[in-house]
Amino acid sequence: MNDLSEKSTLVVGGSRGLGRGIATALAEAGAAVVSVARTPAAVDAAGGVGAVEAVTADASDPSVAGSLLDRYEPEAVILVAGANPLIRPLQHHTWETFSANWHTDVKIAFHWLREALLKPLHSGSRVVVISSGAAVAGSPLTGGYAGAKATQRFITGYAQEEANRAGLGITFTAVLPRITPLTDLGRPAVRAYAARSGQSEQAYIQQFGEPLSPERAGAAMVELVGADATTIAPAYLLSSAGLQKLA
């Protein structure tokens, strides 16, 4: 595992699921980790692992990104936070449920990417936006989720273009995890898609290979944060096999 001793990292949405695995792995690799979550109870759950500092904040609040970037001066920012989509067919959504991930996931990415550019973060810093494999595969049972996650990937690319134009030396990349039954986000989705296809949950998930675990996601982020900036791709698919560069 890469040695990230004393590297300051900020994990937005680091209290559960893949975010918790990422915060834990970064801390175990020696990084000083700040885990941001909305509720005190959720944050406390992530605060007992290594050098993880828990912060209670709403990542979608426009004032939070700039405030925390100024306070902690992170060398790496991992954006994992987002809303759990309501799982039902298109005709059973309302506009409010359909657009929920646009008002959370996309909003969070927009505010944090914007503030990383405006501050700006120190040269050599990197920002990783955790999108979803749904951004390329679609997700017909989760309303606007797939589109929102694709937009996260797009605006991460826009941020990289702006950083390059300004010569900021910041690396922005998007990571798209495959669906997994090992998180609170993925478990109900696997159940619903298995039922939709007339398969057992086990049969459905087997087609994707070994499920992606929070621990494997954490190992991948340690690899990415510790990598040479010149080797980092604009986007990756993340599975249990690790990171795969996307064109």
Image (cartoon, rainbow, N blue to C red):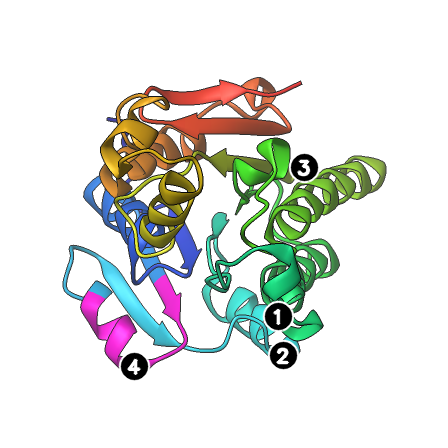
Label 4 is placed on what type of residue? Pro
Between marks 2 and 4 in the image, the one whose residue lies nearer the viewer: 4
Q: Disc 1 designates what residue?
A: 66
Between marks 1 and 4 in the image, the one whose residue lies nearer the viewer: 4
Give the quadrant of residue 172. Answer: top right
Q: Which residues are magenta?
A: 35-45
The reply, left or right, for residue 221 in relation to residue 28 is right
What is the distance, in whole Å, between disc 1 and disc 4 at their CAs? Answer: 21 Å
> Which residue occupies the foreground of this view, 241 or 123?
241
Q: Is residue 44 magenta?
A: yes
Indicate the position of residue 170 as horizontal and vertical percent values: 64, 40
What is the distance, in whole Å, between disc 4 and disc 3 at their CAs? Answer: 35 Å
The reply, left or right, for residue 41 in relation to residue 190 is left
Q: Disc 3 designates what residue?
A: 169
Label 3 is placed on what type of residue? Gly
Residue 40, label in figure: 4
Q: Is residue 218 magenta?
A: no
Q: Disc 2 designates what residue?
A: 63
Residue at 19% in and 43% down: 28
The reply, left or right, for residue 173 in relation to residue 120 is left
Give the quadrant of residue 64. Answer: bottom right
